[in-house]
Structures are given as structure tokens and as C-alpha cells.
Image (cartoon, coloured by chain):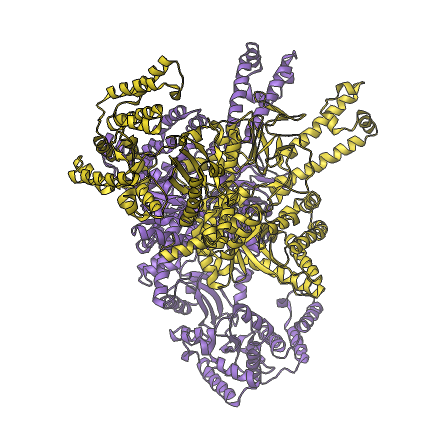
Chain colours: A purple, B yellow
């Protein structure tokens, strides 16, 4: 009997039986029943015969069920009907057989009809039983049953089963019975059904499932025999679904829906409109009270939000199932936080209840507050968050761009299930048709992608690769921005920032901060980035890329002058102009982050990245030459304006002015000057060209070749820090050297830092508290870690470059050429540039950390590659003792949670004596 | 006294003093003398005063010398003269002072004149003594002495010192004495000179030398006081140099030259022609016999060929110095081998006596026997061996090309000492002037570079960057080949091969083979290469690069078809054509190497390397278009031949034929076809383009993408081996997979090998004994070594790629952009692509070997990078337990010796308890 079963008896009773016992034990009104043990199954399978004793025990149990529900099995007045289900120790969903409505015979069906007041219901139920029994127990093919039903429907001229007449059903029943020797004794039915479930343990489906899942073949299945209850028994019956809390918002409120005189499938089908569960209070007040009490009870028992299926038969409430309820990401956080407040769960449990994917979904980016824009049009706000990307009309295109790491917005009439790969790969979805429950909306919400649907202002001409949004024409590849929170669609790329947190998210993440061992910093190179970093809870900046500052429009011309300098003097002149600008950057970032650490990486990228490409320059040169030739021929033609290409108007304010300039030779001088300049630039670009730029003249190699550049940067850091200190602003800058592969390089850089430190500190009269460290992104640096840490106070693993070097993969090339095939063929499980490679790169990291700490036991170790924001990688980093990760501000909250979960998981493993994986 | 001194007393007596004692002890007739100890020097330097006791001891020793030579110090009849030399425990050549002819005074000079029979000799000697003593002991400036001498020479109207009259010398002596207070007591002279030598320990030169060499400052110098002997004393005197064996050939013969009545400098100056030392037999028969006996004695004592300086004074032989004689590389081998036969030294000692540089010098390449050529001209065969390279007229150009790894021939009128960097960098030297003892010849021989001098057929116009050789015009950058063994100069690049060995080299290297632990294989991809490998003593082929076979002119079009294939079927067609060709290659190589192992590496390089470059194709396309346009305009001009650019003649057999083709439109069809083909090719090339080709789509990554290619290669290996086995030829092929970074890749390749093995072995009915292994050239492979060796039976370190990945240096870029600076600044000691990086790459190798052998203790480990032929790297590889190295056939003999020396060095270190470096 269920009342004797408990959740921890799955071995003997199977999972389903044990769970039913557990529910029963806490007083949940489940339809009564009992379980036949797995041991009986194993014994049966050996002899292929139900032992007499087992038969007796089954009947004894059945008697007790009869007593509980006050019905008799085989009673022609009010017959007890039961379901027979398999239930293995480990759930094997859909693998084995189930028989419902067992106990119906030609006699009992009449009692059912009378009691329920519906002959149709009774015969339909009988028909269904015969179908299942005949098929599963007696092996009659399904199509034989179907044929009989189809013939009858044709006879009556109806399309649906429900439209059949009672007489028709009776005819069908009669014909079904003729298909096989259907036993008219309920007890015989029961024994045969139990045998059939036992046998289903060894059917082909079940065997291959177990093989696939690595489950043992010799444990057998339990059999659950349970009273049938019918929500469609009469008007005093009904059925419904209830959540113990709102699964959308997480709010603590009774949530769900129900239908009177209906079966579960009536709710799903949508034929009848279900009512909110609260209205149950009016219809079945007692059942409602009981249900509400049950909701409270199951939550307290299972310590999580529950999703309950219930049925009311003739006024009596039955809970058919309760399970942990699915919820949105936002609800997950709210429920976790609330349950801690309600003392239902601990903070640590709460932290394990919300996944990093949930946090990622909550943190849909939004359009930066300062952005100025006018929407092109507006649709329905179907899934929150903003997204920007190029227009793509087909899912394949979106998927292809996604693989390349490009951002796309899938723009479609409406989406279908076939489009799922495109939606997954896209940044967001924009559809012309469909509501907020359309396919696109539902899928996008599930994936946490911004989505705008039902956008009337959108007209797509896919064949031409064009569309209109509002009044404007776009082609595939043009960039737009959508805001799924407002439904707005904008032209071009708007700056997106992470959203502000809801209060409970703040609370939740603050708990993560209390738990985690690893620090979380952000990668940021601007004041705005630093502000975002703070807002997302970063404890500092782990990577401030100074080349970003070089690339700013007001700097680039000076940087180019520096590169094109003919000698040290010219180079120094350019650097002298850069110094105050860079100092200003550092000052504002350090001020924003005060008193937190800011790790400033000196220039890393090769110089040619600051110059236009050869192709660009060649094109420009050719253009200049062509233009020159065009001008010469123009001069020979009297009526210029007729000949002039409209494109040229862009370059020329007016034809008259143009001709004027031509006549006074200004043009020629200009043209020649330009040609000369571009040629010089082209020569420089050619001289800087590299066969393998990833392994080229960059990082500290560049620093050593042009010491003036690093000197300027070091001086900018020191002066910025010194000036802030004099203002009373606490600062903690850290200088980090990129691409280090020998101790000599680091010593060289350290000497320059000390020299400039002495000079600046002397000049300002303050002591600047700077730390000095090394990027570890070259394999040799790992091998030399013990030597490097003599000088470096911290290591920061640049896992992007380190992964490239470890695999000898160029990321750009590999992701285009062979990584997809490698992942598909399982030669590599993951893309090592997204998920850290545990077996290779991490081993190198461990060696580097071990050797580095041997020399300097208090060496700080961080990770500032892209992997610093990936939850799985964060677990790995935690496991090898990394001190902090640094990632994009967007991913800081994810990292905070992942780091906390890693700590908790480690503690749990320690408790359970689980060794960490190598 | 020398007789009390021994070689192991250098600490107390200084090196020179101890060596003199050693010579004395084995009965070599050295001029008698004694040594003042370094301790006396240290004591003196503290007090700056010669203690009374030391003075007494010096005089006692001097008395004993007087007795030995039967002359008296200060004797006016036949005075004893001595030299005073410094001699520190560690030799400091030229750093401290020497005084000769001490003991001459106004009185004793007369006795010297009388005894030698030459007043001139006596006063010249006195003059020299005064100069040295005045300068070194009394601090008179050299120019003051020189001025006096010059005035006297002017007075007498002579140019050389030797032309002065006796009277003139006497005047000079008188004036020299006036420059300072020259002591006329020989004993006072002696004490003052000793003090001066003691003080010279602390002169500026000596101090800075010690600092530079890391020598201690507090040990002091010894002082050697030795009887002067004069080869120019009279006609019964003479001087000479003798080698105990021929230093050019190594032949065991008494070798050297002498002059009667002459000083050592007379031999060097070349004024008088010395006579061969054998003629001494006639002139001074007794001295000759004694000298010959001494030659034998010193060789037996020092166990190496000696270079002796001797002087005969008045019939008595004195050996002034004996030291290990310099010798040519060829002589080094011959002497080492002969001395073993003579039981003077052991084989192991012989192996340490010849350097790998010597072997390298002996192994000058020669022009391959099969090459057909006609010399342009012929000069003098100044330094043996052949070389090929581009013509460079200036040493700077040669040095610049050398840095880029390009081969140059320095072509010059004649060379001067300023050109040394160019000669060092060049492959060989060709000069228009100079004999076989000219600067170019001597330097080239020393460096072991081929050289042709005195080439009358060479006329250089350096300003125009042109030259004529024989009847032909050349420009800088054109390729020539010179043969320094014949003096011939050829146009273009001829194939060079290593020379055949002299018999003693064979013997010598066979001893190396007996000693060395590491195997030595060669890298070869052709039958010719395999033959060379065998000839040079390789024990197998360690790297057979299959792409070399793909690049052969008869294969390349098929390979291109394969790359351009639209589908698998087309690709298979091309591969089916390649299979028999590749099988043929393998068969011949395996047959040549039978029964030795041949490691065949499957295709490694990216596909685009088989296609022309984008630039080439664009140029071709442009050319085609331009040509097309030119043809069109040509057609409109009646007289074609006048317009046609002479360059076009190269492309067109004749103008008539050309026009004919134009008229029948053949040309247009061809032109269009070409344009189309080139465009298709260009598209493919663009699609294969990579940002970082070194880290790109190559090796096993390519194999997995296009399995048909590896299948074809594996099949070719198996079929070749099977066919040979059926012929009864023993074979040992090894299949090696390049660029492996995961165990899955290796498993994949191994599955294909097994599948094809079964198929081929079944078909041929033989079992093919193939080994399967992995290149280890990706860092991750090192980290996964323990997993890889589950499948791989051997590892072969590709140290070129592994070094690139470990440093994150692209070799091509690094050597151009920053490696020279890194070496110059000592950030890196060596170029890690020439000399293996002990601290980084070798650590990775050690980890890989340790982990690999944990799984498979009998794992074979080889090195097939360029480092496999570098002696220092070979020592390192030996130290970490590598089983074999594989290098270019040219370097196999070097590797054989280096491997032997590594073994011997290791044994010696073990004996001496020296720990290997980490």
C-alpha cells in the first residue's frame, strides 16, 4: 500500500511507487493504491509465472483499496477501476506500458454508466480499456482497433471520436471484444496486466534505453496499481493544474487553472477556456481549501515551488502528481530569495536553485540611457531586452553568422518550429505577424532573446533580399537594433548596456558574493565601461586594454604619426601628445573604480592594426589615380555638370568650386600630396606586414623595440595615480605586461617601471601603490613561471591567446575551417575558445601556478580571457585555485553566481568525499 | 727553480711557471730559470716593498741558474741575461708586462759583443733592454724612445732599425740612458723589474680583463725569471718552429721551418725564406736529433700534436715553448685516428679531440655527381667545397641576406679584413684577384667556406650592380654556383651533395657510432635523399615529408585537380591518379633504406601551399587582360613586327604564327579559357586564405576534413610495403600523423590505418610490420602525451613548430622583426629556431616524455626538427633521454659525433659527480 512506501524505497518499489508513498505519507490525497515490488518482477521474469502467493498478496492489497474508496472491484453498481503502471527504480519515461480503466467488463460498465449518469462516458471508457488491454496484454495490433473505429465513424458520418453516438460506441466495443479473448473477470484482467508490465521490462525499447543510459538489466520494474479517478465523472467533478507560486513572476500566489467536468486533456486542448484556479473557491469551496492547504504542505515538504495536477471526482479532491515547477528566470530568482526569507531553504540552497543561464536571461541588455534615437516603427514587446545586429531573412543565414560570432537579427514574416536554429543563433527576432504568444514570442522568451512581433511597419521582400521598416528601405546585412521591452525598432547599432537589477536579484547576487572564494572583476577600457563594471558588481578592473584608447578617433591620427615617425625624435613628439590624453583616461577610470584595483595592460596589438589595410590603401590610391584621370578628361569637356558622375558630388561641394580649384592648380597640389602620403603609408603597412600576426611583433616585443611607447604609458599611469592621490582619491593601479615569454622581458619592463616610478614619485612627492604583473598567454611563460614570479606580483592568464598557442589553432581560421567539424565529430567536445580546455590548457595553467607559487607563495592569479565569463570554465578555474576572473561587464553577475556555485559544489564534493576531476 | 715545479702547481707558481717546470721534468731542454711565487706577489702588493728575505731567495736561485748555464749575471766577459715575465694562475694573455735582456749594463754589453762576435747585435740588444726597462719599470713614454731612434735614423739616412750603424746604436743607447736613471747594477735591475711585474697585476688592463672574465683579484701573479737565449747569437745559432705532425694533413711527419743566425720574428716577417725543419739535420745534426727526440717525448707526454718553438744558441738546443698545435679539421680527424692506432689516446679521447665544427668543415658539399654543366670560367681553387647562392657585391648585402637565411655568394675584386662579416654570412666567395694565400682564401679556409680566387674571367661593375663571368652578364641577385675544389664557376643553382668521406673519417665516425646512445636518422623525401642518408651513416629516415612528393612537377597538376575538386568523386579521381605515383615513391625509398625504418609523415602543409599565391594569380590575370588589350590594338596596326615589344617574343614563337592564331580565333578561345581557369583558381585560393597559416588548416586537421587524402597515402604506404615484402625485401615503414593536438585525432587516424591495413594485407596475403606514431609539435599534444601514447608507438618532436607555439613566435616574422634585437639585448641567448630552448621547449618535451612513458614505458622518442642537426641541441636531447634525432643528410655525420660526445660528456660528468643542468 502507498501508505507503507517512502521516497527512499525506490530500489524495491520503483521510483513512481516510492514517490506516491512519500506523497501519501505527508497527507496528500492521492487516489489509493499499492505497489508490486521490483523483486516480484525479477522473480517473475525467471519463471514467467505469477506465484500463487503474489496473487494472494495482490488481492489482499486490493481489498484494502476497496475499503478506502468504498467501491468494489467488479462491482456492477459502482465498480472500482484501477490503472496499472510500471515504475522502475530509475525512471524510464515512456519505455514501458500502462493500462488504464482496468476493472471494466460488460457488467461493470453498466454500473459506471449509471453512477456517472453518462452512458457515453462509460462506453467510451470501456472502449479505451479494451484498446489498451487488447493491444498491450493480448498483442492485438493497434491498426485493427483503429479500423473498427474508423468504420463506425464513417457509418455515422462523423469526423471525431467524441461525435460518435452511444450506440456507435457500443458497436465498437462489441467488435473490439471480437478481436481477442478479452477476459470478463476483473481479477484476471489485473493479473494479466501485471504480467504484461513485468514483461515490458524486457521489451526492445526498454532494453535499448537501458543500454544507452548505462542502467542495469537485472533490477526489474515495480508495478503501481492505483484507483482511477475521473474529473469528467459528473458536474460534481473537475480537473486542473496548480502552481504553488506564480511561475512567471515568482510571486507567492496560488496560480493555475481548472475545468468542471473535464479531463486533463481538455485543459491542454484549448477547446474550453479554463478558469483561474482561484475561482475554484466558488465552485468547489471545500476542495479549494484542501488544495490550498496541500499547496502549502507540498512546498514545505519538497522545499521548492510545485506544479500539481489535481482531479475532483464527485466532490473529492485527488492530487495526481506534484513535481518541481518550471519557472522563468526572473521567477527562479524571486522564488529563491523569497524562500530564504520564509526560512524554507538556506541561502546556499537558493544559490544552487538559480542557474547561470537564468541570470543570463534576466540580464538582457538594454539600450544605453544616453543614446539618442527615433524608432523606425513599433511592434509588440514579445520578449524583453534589446539586441543589435545585421538583418538576416532566413534562419540558415542567422545560424551561419552565429557560427562566425557575428551578430544577426532574424527578420521574418513569422517563425515556425523549423526556424529554431536560426532563433538560437540570432541576437533577437523581429516578425511582421504574430502576437505575444506566437511561436517567435514563446521561443524567444524561452531562450531569453529579445523579440518584437506583430510589427505592422515591417514589409519583407525576401527574394530581393530587402525589407522596409517604417519608411525606410533596408537590405540584408544592414544593421538594426530592436528593443523587445518596448517593441521599438531602430536603424543602426545602438550602444547596449546591462540592465539595472531588480531588488531581489541584487539580494541574490549579494549572497553569491558572500559565498564565493574567487574574485570577479570586469574588462573595461573606458569610464563608461568602468561604471558598468561597478553597477554589475565587479570588484575591480582585471583588464584595461590600452589599445582601445589608442583607437579613439581623436588619438588615431597621433598614433599614426607615431608609427610613421622617421626617427626617435619624431616618435617622441607624437608620444608627447598622447601622454596627456592617456593620462586623462587613466585618471577617470581610476577615479571611477577608487579604491578598487585596475589592471592596466600596456600596448599589446601589433602596430599595423592602427593603420589601414593594404587593400584599403591600394583602393584609395587607385581611386585617386582614376579620379585624377577623370579630372584631366573633364577639363577637356566644355559642359562639366552633365558628365560628372553623381557619386562625385559627395566629394565635391560644387562643380563651380571644383573647376575653380582645378584652374588655380590647388587640386593638383592636393592630389599629389595625397598620393604621396598614401604611398608612404602603403610602404609602412607593407613593412609591418606579418605572415602570422597572432605570433607576431606585438606585446612586450613591441615595447622592447620602441621603449618610448611603454615609457609613455607607464608615465601616464604613474602621473594619473599621483595626481589622484594628491586629490585624496585612493587608487590601486596594476601594470601588466602582455605576451611575456622570457624573464628578461619582464625584468626589462620592470626596470623601466622603477625608473619612471622614482622620477614621477619624486616630482609629485607621493608614493604610488602600484602592483606589477605579467600576462600569462604564451606557453613559454607557463614554463618560466617560477622565474617570472620572482618579478611579477600577479599573473593574469590570457586564456584566449594561451588556448590558441596550446592548440596551435588560429581562432579566426579554425572557427571558419575545421572547428565545427571537430565539434560535430566529437574530436573536441567544446569550442576551446568558449569553454576552457580542461585537459590541455588547464594543465598548463596548473603547472604555471604551481611553479609560480613555489617562488612567490602569495602570487595573485587571475584569468582575463573570454573564459572568465563562462560558468563551466569558472568552475574549473575555481578548482585549480585561481584568485579572480575578469570578464565583460555584461557577464559579471553570471560570473559572481558561477563562482559561488563553484564554491558550494566544492564544499558538497568535499562532504561527500568526491575527488575533483583531473 | 723550474726543476722543482710541476704542472699542478699553477696556484702558487702561475700557469707559465708551472708549465715550464713540467717541461723541465720530462727532460725538455728549456733555458734555465726560476719562478717567484704568487704569494710573494700578494705579500708585496700589501706592503709595496720587496722583503729582504725574498731578495735573498731570488739571488740564491740566480746563483743556481748561473751554475747551470755557466755564465755569471753581470759578468763583463760573458754575461748571463734573463727575461722577466709575469705568469698568473689563469693565463691573462698580453695583460701584464715582460722585460727581456735584463742584465745588460755599459760593462756587460761589451762582453756580449765580444762573445757573440757582433757589436751591432750587442748594442741593439742593449738598446732594446733600455727601451723596455725604461718604459715598463721607470715609466718613460714610448714616444720619447721612438723620437731618439727616428732622429738617429734620419741622421744616417736609413729607413729601418736594422740599417743603423753600430755607432748610431751606441748614440741611441747613450741618449736612452739620459731619459731616466737606468740602474747599472744587474741585481738592482732584477729587483726593480720584479716589482714592476708585481705591480702590473693591478694595472687597468689587467683589472678590467679579470672583471670581464670573472677572475679573482686577490691571487696575484707569479714571476718567471729565465735565461735569455739568442738564435741570432752567431752562425752556430738559429731558431725555428716545429710541429710534431703535419698540421694541414695530420700526417705523422716532422714539420716546420728554421733559420740560421736569426730570431723568431725573422721567420714571421718573411724577409728571409726559412728552410724546412728536415734540413736542420744537415746544419745542426746533433740539435736535430735532439729536437726529433723531443718531438716524440712531448707528444707522448702531452698526448697530442705539439707546436714547439726552439732556439739553438752556440750549438745548444733550447725549447722555448711547446703547446697543443692548431690544425685543420681534416688533420684533426687524421691525428685523432692515428693516435688511437698508436695507442697514444683512447677512442673516447679521440672523439673529444675533434669538434663538430671540424666535421662540418670537412663535409663541404660537392656538386652532385649526375649534374650536367659547363663552367663559365675558372679561377684558383682557394678553399674546397661547392656553394650556390645569389650574387652579392658587398659584404653588408651578404650579411643581410645571411640573416634572412638566404644563400649568397660574395663576389668581389678582392677581400679585406673589413669584409669578414660578409664572408662569414655568405655561402662562398669568388674574387677576381688574389692567390691561394690571399685574404679571401685564408679566411675562407679558416671558416671552411668554398672560395675561388684570382678569377680572370670575372669583371665586376659594382656601381651598376652587374658583372660578367666568362662571356655572360649577371646582375646582383642572379644565382651562381662555385666549386672551390676545382676553381670552376657555373651559372644557376646546381644540386649539391655531401662529399664521400676519407677513410679515417669513416673510421672516426664509426667509433662515434660505437659510443653514442642516441640513434641518428636523416630527413629525406626522395630516393636520392635516401641514398645520401645512407652514405652519411643514417640509421633510417626519421622524417619523410610526403608533401615534397606532391610538389613534384608531374604531381602538382593532379594535386591541384584534387584541391579544386567540386565533390568527393572528383577528388577521388585525382587521388586515384596520385596513388600509384606515391606508392612508387614509397617503394623506392623503402627499398633503398631496407631494412631500416622510414618514418612517413602524412600530408602536413595547408592546401593553399600547392596553389599559386593571390598576388601571382592577380598578376597573371592582369597580364592576360593587358595582353588581350594589346592584341586588340595590334590587330589594328598593319606592320606588327615593328610594334611588338621584344619581351613578347618570349611568349610567341613567331609573329606570323601569332597572327595566324589570331585570325582563326584560336587565340581568343584560349585567352578566355585561361581567364576563366585563373578566376576559378583565384576564388579557391581566396577561400583557402588564412590569417595565421602556421596555426591553420593543416596536418591531421586537413586529414580529418578530407579523409580521402590520408586514405590514399596510408594505402600507398601499405601497398608499397606489401609489394616489397612479396619481393623478399625487408621493410620497416612508420606512419606518423602531423599536428596532433587531441587523442581523438590520433584515434581517428589509427582507425583508418587499421582498416586499410586489413584490406591491403588481406589482398596481398602478407603481414606488414608498420609502426604508428605521432608528431609532437603542438603544445597540447605534450599535455595529452599520456593519452596519445596509448595509441602512438612513437613520438617524434617537431621542434620547429613546437618552438614557434611555445614562444608564440612566428619564425618568419620574428627573425625579420625582433629576434636580432632580442639576441643583441641578451633577452634571448640564442635563436630558439637554431638552438633548442632549454628552459621552455625542453621542459615541455620532458613533461611529454614523462607522461608518455608512464602509459607506454617502451615509447620511442625522436626529434625531427631542425634542432636534430645542431650539436648543442643534440647534447640536450641526449640529456633528457631522446632515443634518436633526425636531420638533413648533410648534418648526419655532425649528429653522429655530437651524440657520441654527449654520451662521453655524460659519463665524465657522472664520474665527476656533476649534476645535469635543469
Q: Which of A221 and B675 is in front in this view?
A: B675
Q: In which quarter of the image is the C terminus of chain A?
A: bottom left
Residue A286, image x, y percentages: 40, 69
Residue located at (69% from left, 29% from top): B623
Q: How many labels does the image show?
A: 0
Residue located at (61% from left, 84% from top): A183
Residue B770, image x, y percentages: 61, 61
B862 left or right, relative to B177 = right
What is the residue that sits farthest to the bottom in this orientation? A52
Q: Can the viewer see residue A820?
A: no
Residue B414 falls in which quadrant of the image? top right
A601 left or right, relative to A71 = left
Q: In which quarter of the image is the N terminus of chain A?
A: bottom left
What is the residue that sits farthest to the top in this orientation? A664
Q: Nearer the viewer, residue A202 or A779?
A: A779
Q: Can the viewer see residue B797?
A: yes
Q: Nearer the viewer, residue A767 or B246?
A: B246
Residue B415, image x, y percentages: 52, 27
- Is the residue A234 above or below the residue A464 in the image? below
Q: Which of B10 and B2 is in front in this view?
A: B2
Residue A142, image x, y percentages: 65, 72
Residue located at (21% from left, 40% from top): B60
Amino acid at each position: 500500500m502507498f501508505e507503507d512506501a517512502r521516497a527512499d524505497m525506490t530500489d524495491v518499489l520503483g521510483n513512481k511507487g516510492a514517490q506516491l508513498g512519500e506523497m501519501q505519507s505527508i497527507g496528500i490525497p492521492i487516489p489509493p493504491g499499492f505497489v508490486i515490488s521490483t523483486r516480484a518482477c525479477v522473480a517473475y521474469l525467471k519463471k514467467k509465472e505469477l506465484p500463487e502467493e503474489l496473487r494472494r498478496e495482490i488481492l489482499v492489497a486490493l481489498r484494502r483499496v476497496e475499503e478506502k474508496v468504498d467501491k468494489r472491484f467488479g462491482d456492477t453498481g459502482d465498480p472500482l477501476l484501477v490503472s496499472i503502471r510500471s515504475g522502475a527504480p530509475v525512471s524510464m519515461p515512456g519505455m514501458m506500458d500502462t493500462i488504464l480503466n482496468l476493472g471494466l467488463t460488460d457488467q461493470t460498465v453498466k454500473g459506471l454508466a449509471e453512477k456517472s449518469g453518462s452512458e457515453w462516458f462509460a462506453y467510451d471508457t470501456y472502449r479505451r480499456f479494451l484498446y489498451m488491454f487488447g493491444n498491450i496484454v493480448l498483442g492485438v495490433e493497434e491498426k485493427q482497433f483503429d479500423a473498427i473505429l474508423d468504420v463506425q465513424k464513417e457509418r455515422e458520418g462523423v469526423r471525431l471520436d467524441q461525435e460518435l453516438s452511444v450506440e456507435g460506441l457500443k458497436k465498437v466495443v462489441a467488435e473490439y471484444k471480437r478481436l481477442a479473448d478479452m477476459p470478463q473477470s476483473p481479477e484476471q484482467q489485473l493479473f494479466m496486466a501485471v504480467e504484461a508490465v513485468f514483461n515490458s521490462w524486457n521489451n526492445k525499447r526498454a532494453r535499448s534505453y537501458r543500454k544507452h543510459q548505462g542502467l542495469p538489466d537485472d533490477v526489474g520494474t515495480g508495478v503501481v496499481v492505483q484507483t482511477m479517478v475521473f474529473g469528467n465523472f459528473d458536474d460534481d467533478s473537475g480537473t486542473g493544474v496548480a502552481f504553488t507560486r506564480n511561475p512567471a513572476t515568482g510571486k507567492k500566489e496560488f496560480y493555475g487553472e481548472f475545468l468542471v467536468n473535464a479531463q486533463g486533456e481538455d485543459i491542454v486542448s484549448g477547446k474550453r477556456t479554463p478558469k483561474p484556479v482561484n475561482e475554484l473557491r466558488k465552485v468547489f469551496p471545500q476542495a479549494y481549501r484542501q488544495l490550498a492547504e496541500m499547496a502549502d504542505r507540498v512546498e514545505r515538504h519538497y522545499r521548492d515551488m510545485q506544479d500539481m495536477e489535481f482531479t475532483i471526482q464527485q466532490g473529492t479532491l485527488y492530487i495526481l502528481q506534484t513535481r518541481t515547477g518550471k519557472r522563468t528566470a526572473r521567477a527562479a530568482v524571486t522564488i529563491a530569495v523569497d524562500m530564504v526569507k520564509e526560512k524554507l531553504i538556506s541561502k546556499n540552497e537558493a544559490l544552487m536553485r538559480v542557474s547561470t543561464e537564468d541570470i543570463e536571461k534576466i540580464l538582457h541588455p538594454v539600450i544605453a540611457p544616453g543614446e539618442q534615437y527615433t524608432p523606425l516603427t513599433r511592434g509588440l514587446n514579445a520578449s524583453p531586452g534589446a539586441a543589435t545586429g545585421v538583418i538576416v531573412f532566413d534562419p540558415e543565414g542567422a545560424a551561419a553568422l552565429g557560427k562566425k560570432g557575428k551578430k544577426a537579427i532574424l527578420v521574418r514574416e513569422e517563425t515556425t518550429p523549423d526556424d529554431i536554429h536560426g532563433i538560437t543563433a540570432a541576437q533577437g527576432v523581429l516578425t511582421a505577424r504574430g502576437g505575444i504568444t506566437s511561436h517567435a514570442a514563446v521561443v524567444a522568451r524561452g531562450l531569453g532573446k529579445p523579440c518584437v512581433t506583430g510589427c505592422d511597419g515591417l514589409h519583407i521582400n525576401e527574394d530581393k533580399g530587402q525589407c522596409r521598416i517604417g519608411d525606410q528601405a533596408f537590405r540584408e546585412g544592414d544593421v538594426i537594433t530592436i528593443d523587445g521591452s518596448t517593441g521599438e525598432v531602430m536603424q543602426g547599432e545602438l550602444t547596449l548596456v546591462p540592465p539595472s537589477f531588480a531588488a531581489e536579484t541584487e539580494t541574490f547576487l549579494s549572497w553569491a558574493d558572500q559565498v564565493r572564494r574567487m574574485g570577479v572583476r570586469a574588462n573595461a577600457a573606458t569610464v563608461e565601461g568602468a561604471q558598468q563594471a561597478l553597477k554589475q558588481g565587479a570588484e575591480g578592473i582585471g583588464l584595461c586594454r590600452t589599445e582601445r584608447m589608442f583607437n579613439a578617433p581623436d588619438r588615431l591620427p597621433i598614433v599614426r604619426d607615431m608609427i610613421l615617425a622617421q626617427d626617435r625624435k619624431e616618435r617622441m613628439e607624437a608620444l608627447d601628445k598622447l601622454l596627456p590624453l592617456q593620462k586623462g583616461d587613466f585618471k577617470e577610470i581610476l577615479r571611477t573604480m577608487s579604491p578598487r584595483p585596475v589592471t592596466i595592460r600596456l600596448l599589446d596589438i601589433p602596430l599595423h592594426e592602427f593603420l589601414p589595410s593594404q587593400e584599403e590603401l591600394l583602393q584609395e590610391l587607385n581611386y585617386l589615380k582614376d579620379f585624377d584621370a577623370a579630372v584631366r578628361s573633364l577639363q577637356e569637356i566644355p559642359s562639366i555638370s552633365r558628365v560628372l558622375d553623381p557619386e562625385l558630388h559627395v566629394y565635391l561641394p560644387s562643380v563651380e568650386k571644383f573647376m575653380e580649384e582645378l584652374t588655380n592648380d590647388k587640386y593638383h597640389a592636393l592630389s599629389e600630396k595625397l598620393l604621396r602620403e598614401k604611398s608612404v603609408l602603403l610602404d609602412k603597412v607593407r613593412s609591418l606586414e606579418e605572415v602570422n600576426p597572432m605570433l607576431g611583433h606585438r606585446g612586450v616585443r613591441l615595447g622592447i623595440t620602441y621603449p618610448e611607447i611603454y615609457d609613455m604609458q607607464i608615465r601616464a599611469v604613474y602621473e594619473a595615480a599621483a595626481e589622484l592621490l594628491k586629490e585624496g582619491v585612493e587608487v590601486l593601479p596594476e601594470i601588466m605586461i602582455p605576451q611575456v615569454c622570457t624573464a628578461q622581458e619582464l625584468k626589462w619592463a620592470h626596470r623601466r617601471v622603477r625608473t619612471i616610478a622614482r622620477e614621477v614619485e619624486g616630482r609629485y612627492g607621493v608614493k604610488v601603490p602600484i602592483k606589477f604583473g605579467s600576462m600569462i598567454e604564451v606557453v613559454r611563460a607557463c614554463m618560466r613561471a617560477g622565474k617570472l614570479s620572482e618579478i611579477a606580483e600577479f599573473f593574469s592568464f590570457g586564456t584566449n591567446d594561451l588556448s590558441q598557442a596550446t592548440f596551435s589553432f588560429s581562432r579566426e581560421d579554425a572557427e571558419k575551417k575545421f572547428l565545427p567539424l571537430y565539434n560535430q565529430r566529437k574530436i573536441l567536445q567544446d569550442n576551446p575558445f568558449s569553454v576552457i580546455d580542461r585537459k590541455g590548457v588547464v594543465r598548463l595553467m596548473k603547472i604555471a601556478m604551481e611553479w609560480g607559487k613555489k617562488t612567490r607563495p602569495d602570487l595573485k592569479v587571475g584569468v582575463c580571457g573570454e573564459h572568465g565569463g563562462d560558468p563551466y570554465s569558472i568552475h574549473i578555474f575555481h578548482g585549480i585555485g585561481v584568485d579572480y576572473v575578469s570578464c565583460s561587464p555584461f557577464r559579471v553577475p553570471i560570473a559572481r553566481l558561477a563562482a559561488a556555485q563553484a564554491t558550494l559544489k566544492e564544499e558538497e564534493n568535499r562532504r561527500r568525499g568526491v575527488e575533483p576531476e583531473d
